Image: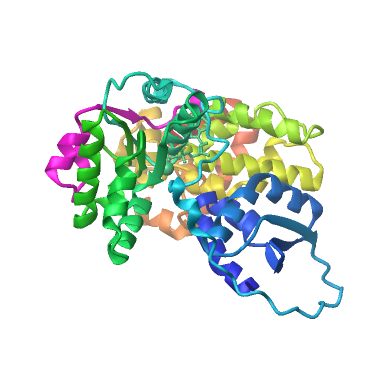
Amino acid sequence: MTNDGWVEIREDLRKRVGKDNYITWIEPLKLSELRDGVASFSVPTTFFGDWVKRNFSDQILHHLHRSGAEVDRIEFALDRISAPKPAKAAEPAPRKRASNEDEVPGAPLDARFTFDSFVVGKPNELAHAAARRVAEGGPVTFNPLFLYGGVGLGKTHLMHAIAHELQTRQPDLRVLYLSAEQFMYRFVQALRERQVMDFKELFRSVDVLMVDDVQFIAGKDSTQEEFFHTFNALVDQNKQIVISADRAPGEIKGLEERIKSRLQCGLVVDLHPTDYELRLGILQQKAEFYHTQYRDLVIAPGVLEFLAHRISTNVRVLEGALTRLFAFASLVGREITLDLTQDCLADILRASDRKVTIEEIQRKVAEHYNIRLSDMIGPKRVRTIARPRQIAMYLAKQLTSRSLPDIGRRFGGRDHTTIMHGVRKIEELMTADSQLADDLQMLKRLLQG
Ligand code: ADP
Ligand code: MG
């Protein structure tokens, strides 16, 4: 395999590791050699290599295997740009791996996704409790367990945790975890290779079946059909099934009614969007983990709180932010302060800002200063109205990405220089007037939710 081959494979990794990790850690890797079962990658720094090795080598190996490459080990070596390139030896053609790997045909489990590493809070406590119950492996009380919720809220984590736990308690249990996409892929392959009976047998012989992201099979008729039969066969045998999706069974469009109603027969629990406490808990846990790796890194008070407050999208983004922050701080050898955080994560912070509109700003400011909304855009120049109007201009500049002329238009067609003047005026007053500074803080908080 050449570096070009690798470039194709690594695209698949993007989905597994997430975009931020991908850009930071995977994209810079160059495959320099693949020989005798060892894939050698060149990396820019030793730290970089260590990091990738610790965090991503399993996934990289997995994807190399999947592409048919014969690899047992990966190595990282410093990229010696100045050294002359050694003449490339002819590479062995990639051979397909012996296919005795399909004894357990599931997707690999992420070793980090355990119950121990799952932080429980109000938004996920029910889902967590239900997952724990299933993981005990006692008599099946609800079938299926259906977990649903938005992206990055921990569905896959919980499913892997169940699988790990079951495997530890009962090593003989046949637990099969895979995504609905992989289910479909395997089914289509079985059809093509005329091995549908084998496929059926395999899926009917497991003790626990876990299918992640089941919304994927919506609208895919023959896969749905097969899924339905597999599902019924396992339920009839009293085998536990765990399903996840990004929404409730009834809300998955293109899913057959009979499947929807079967999915609703068990226990349906949702993972709610994270709240501040849960996010902070997750950040604290991850930060502790990083501390064991970078003992000399200091994180200033308030940084985790700041992140928990500002990044409210999903846990994956939160984790990506922290990973980048620690990696960056360790590269530059500095304490993780709020300033460093804001610099290092500017793009993430911007993207997760709730979009505030100028209209909202005008409304909130008018409310706060007890003036009419129409006065925001009207011509009155008395101080009691002009000042709040300038405050709204200032906030519009700060909290939205609108240009000055654009803001001007939304303030009754004022000129951009008027807006600029208003913004400057407030900046000036703010430094001397602590009441005004407090007001601005509070308004910002209100507007940013
Ligand atoms: P989903 O499958 O719902 O899209 P994942 O299970 O893949 O989300 O979670 C995304 C990332 O966030 C994973 O790295 C996971 O470990 C982490 N995560 C989500 N929820 C929690 C939690 N409650 N505690 C610890 N980590 C979490
Ligand atoms: Mg998932």
Report the quarter where the C terminus lies: top left
Q: Which of 31 and 437 is in front in this view?
A: 31
Classify residue 316 as left or right of residue 174.
Answer: right
Identify which residue is drawn at 44% across, 38% down: 156
Is residue 74 visible in the rendered structure shown here? yes
Q: How many labels does the image show?
A: 0
Q: What segment carries the magenta color?
A: 249-278
Report the quarter where the N terminus lies: bottom right
Answer whether residue 270 is magenta in the image. Answer: yes
Q: Which of 166 and 82 is in front in this view?
A: 166
Answer whether residue 267 is magenta in the image. Answer: yes
Identify which residue is drawn at 58% across, 51% down: 59
Q: Is residue 107 above or below residue 158?
A: below
Q: Position of residue 444 (x, y in %)?
A: 49, 34
Q: Where is residue 115 in the image (x, y as percent from the top left)?
A: 51, 26
Q: Is residue 115 above or below residue 345?
A: above
Its colouring scheme is: rainbow
